[in-house]
Image (tube, rainbow, N blue to C red):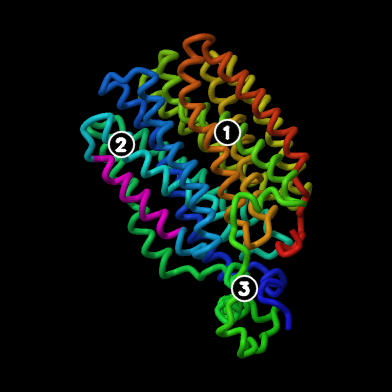
Amino acid sequence: MTSPSARLDGLRFSRAHLRVLSGSGLGWALDAMDVGLIAFIIAALSAEWGLDGSTAGWITSIGFVGMAIGASVGGLLADRLGRRQVFALTLLVYGVATGASALVGGVGALLVLRFLVGLGLGSELPVASTYVSEFAPARIRGRVVVILEAFWAVGWTASAVIGYFVVPLENGWRWAFAIGAIPALYAIIVRWGLPESARWLESRGRVAEAERVVRQFESADPAHAKPAPPAPAPATSARARPARAGVGSLFRAGLATRTVALWTVWFFVNFSYYGAFIWIPSILVAQGFDLIRSFEYTLIITLAQLPGYAVAAWLIEVWGRRATLSTFLVGSAVAAMLFGTAGEVWQILAFGCLLSFFNLGAWGALYAVTPELYPTSVRATGAGWAAAFGRIASIIAPLFTPWALGIGGAGLVFTVFAIFFAIAAAATWGLRELKGVALEAT
């Protein structure tokens, strides 16, 4: 009998896939909204509370400390407890912590809550990409995951709109945090509305449950899938005892090279992305633009993320993963160099949009390739630990940016980002090309 995983690969994209993609994507967009909001809130709090660059940097970086821990723990939990369970829990944690941030009266309480937000957010992102990757048919898997990542642009754009219209108001930053509590409500929908990953269920020996999930997808595409007979009776109750997922398994024979290359890409992309985009509103304020104008320019720059994702989603199944990812990273390096020299408004907008286009297209390709590099038993662990290693860079970057700005200005800062993008581009060629390859063959 054909396995549930093989039958999933034979389906065409249907309403069932759209439900998984949109349900996960909405959670992804809410994540992005939270991360994006802190860029605008920091600019407002710096003025209201008189924060220096170091303190403002720590408010941002403490969230990434939480994300690093959350990504590593969340991936391990998702390989042991299931994708959907961990996905819902992480949404709940960071949604509640974000809402509570609206009530803080000082830096200390905000630091604690931002750490908790990071725990939830860091766990959710690699789990969501693994979850969607495991449902997508092999021939379009990369494209589907890039589309999932495109929800990040939707959320970041929402944060820019909130930053522009809400944050400048009296106590606007508090209202912005309150809006960020929405994921706590959405967690309930995720827990009860989405199916568990059939590939994960199959890998745990829960074949009957996997069969039920796959049949839901087959019923949504009756013209392109043959009904499967019931699972053999022993499989209904028998459960496999797979080897425990652990970090060491990511470095066993056949996986070590791709893990090292992947962690390198994640580290340098994280450093450049968060070092730049978290600080762009504040950098513009420092260059003499008022708060409203800097938020307006950031919103325009953010909108360029959407076409970046669209082009990456098309190219990833045409050129392949490595060529698409490396091309967008080289484009990011060039755009960063140009943005560092921008002085006129048109240059800020044009080069900022180029940076946004290429960098977020690269993120889409990176999230597509990450989970498919590992077998099902350690897939979420592999994705989580790659993200966790990258978060080390995202902790350092927000602290590096204000320090480097004081030494050499935007030119120095964005030159460093450009060099790091170039290193990441070179590291992509250590990854395995898996365009159209079944996940079980990885």
Determine which of the numbered discs, if any, sits on residue 202 in the image. Answer: 3
Q: Amino acid at mark 3?
A: Glu
Above/below status of 213 relative to 431 = below
Magenta region: 87-102
Is 95 one of the magenta-colored residues?
A: yes
The N terminus - image quarter:
bottom right
The residue that disc 1 covers is 356
Q: Is 128 situated above or below 41?
A: below
Name which of mark 2 and mark 3 comes first in the sequence.
Answer: 2
Q: Say if the magenta span includes residue 91.
A: yes
The three-letter code of the residue at mark 2 reads Val
Disc with the residue nearer the chain's start (3 vs 1):
3
The CA span between labels 2 and 3 is 47 Å
Is residue 258 in sight in this rendering?
yes
Which residue lies at the image location 26% right of the left edge and 23% below the top edge? Answer: 48
Residue found at x 36% / y 64%: 188
Secondary structure, mark 1, is helix
Q: CA distance from mark 1 to mark 2?
A: 23 Å
Instruction: Name the residue carrying label 2.
Output: 166
- Secondary structure of the residue carrying tag 3 is helix
Q: Quadrant of residue 204?
A: bottom right
- In the image, 341 versus 363, the foreground residue is 363
Give the Cα separation between the discs numbered 3 and 1: 39 Å
Q: Nearer the viewer, residue 241 or 324?
A: 241
